[in-house]
Amino acid sequence: MQRAGGTSRLFVDEVIIHVRGGKGGDGCVSFRREKYVPKGGPDGGDGGHGGSVILVAREGLSTLLDLAGRHHYRAPDGRPGSGNNCAGKRGANLLVSVPVGTLVYDATTGVLLKDLVHDGQAVRVARGGRGGRGNAHFATATHQVPREFEPGLPGQERTLRLELKLIADVGLVGLPNAGKSTLLARLTRARPKIADYPFTTKEPQLGIAELPGFRRLVLADLPGLIEGAHEGVGLGDRFLRHIERTRVIVHLVELCPPAGAPPPAEAYRIIRRELEKYSAALAAREELVVGTKLDLTEAPEALRALRVALGRPVRGISGVSGAGLRELLEEMWATVQRVRAAEAAQAPPRLDLGADFETGPPAAVTLDARDAPAAIGDESFAPLPHAGPSEPALPTGIDGPPSRDADVPVPDDDRAPPADDPAPRADLADPDERDDR
């Protein structure tokens, strides 16, 4: 299969692309011409099916930059059929890699087609066209020299809008220079830009924190928010989409802000107001409040005042000395586990559809990956028989275009006689054969 790829250098979280499935190959008009075989009959083969465009979620990607420079993706066409009942070659499927957490929208209707949240998850966004039938399919007892054939059908075509929402366990929010990047650098191996001026982080950063006992947490550092971010002030609030999937929000508050900056309690309320204006569901998410820069002289007293002002627990940490970091990690882990347990309890029960549904059709029928039904955005395609040369295996749940052989009615003259028909009578046999017997 062909693959579309590239390199990741910048952060792009929204692109618009145009996809088109390959056209099916035309059927062939051919007649058998062989020595000692007069009037060999039609032997035109079917055209090959066109390739499909498939989006595949990949764990190693974190941006849609690869798709930002190329807006058109077209799968190869199927080859036309040929004589001697030879079917044309199928068009190869075009695999387009996208980051995990990509939402696929139809740009015309705005309908969400698929949410790719697992590594290796795939969705066919443009189905290839069917190959046309050759003239061998049109032969009957009364029409023995058919010159009809079917042209290949065009592939599916649509415009898509891809939107990326990063998937993390914990999202770090706060005013600029609250210590978010410093905390991410201390807890993970990520190396975000750190400086003594605001808005040093201009794009989300991901990091993985390692805990004892082979435990891991995925942390997301978001650009700083300021008052009026929902109206576009500063960097705006468009990066908040990346914490909509996080289970826990860690709200960082600078305990000793510089002159002219809001006091800790007011800084906390500013961010809370921005979260509520962006999404009520996001504001209601589980939250941990953390006071940063505990190594400064006035920080312990400011931490106690902040606890009193907010009326809730506030944990103090220092990114320079490392004070409170281990305890914060354990608290984040416990909170994430509690949220996961609550999500599992609220999940609807899975239906038991029986062993036949899970294991597939009976053993007497042989199917491959192309015969499995695949949910294609907002459509579903049932399995149909297919013909033609074999091709490489597809991702699970992705099937190629079915052949049209299943739709061709069998002429009455070609049907086998019923099993209970009597044997031919001896007096109706060939006279020469009766004399030999």
Image: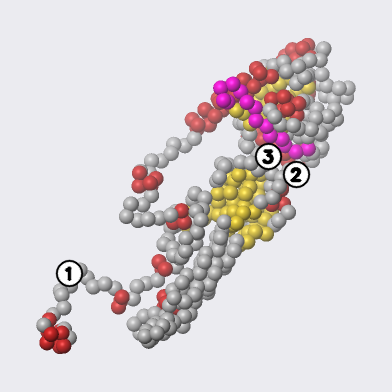
The answer to whether residue 181 is left or right of residue 170 is: right
Give the residue at mark 3.
241
The answer to whether residue 330 is left or right of residue 34 is: right
| Residue at position x 36%, y 80% in the image | 140
The amino acid on which the numbered mark 3 sits, given as a three-letter code, is Arg
Instruction: Characterize the local packing of mark 1: few (<14), some (14-19) or many (20 or more) Cα atoms within 10 angstroms.
Output: few
Q: State the image coordinates of residue 21 (x, y, percent, origin top left).
A: 58, 62
337 or 415: which is nearer to us? 415
Q: Is residue 302 visible?
A: no
Colouring convention used in this rendered image of the protein: secondary structure
Q: Nearer the viewer, mark 3 or mark 1?
A: 1
The amino acid on which the numbered mark 1 sits, given as a three-letter code, is Asp
Instruction: Tell which circle, 1 or 2, labels the residue nearer the N-terminal end.
Output: 2
Verify whether residue 390 appears in magenta: no
Span highlighted in magenta in the image? 202-215
Disc number placed over residue 17 in the picture, else none = none
The amino acid on which the numbered mark 2 sits, given as a three-letter code, is Leu
* Secondary structure category for the residue under label 2: loop
Whole-Å distance between the Cαs marked 3 and 1? 70 Å
Q: Is residue 182 visible?
A: yes
| Residue at position x 62%, y 20% in the image | 330
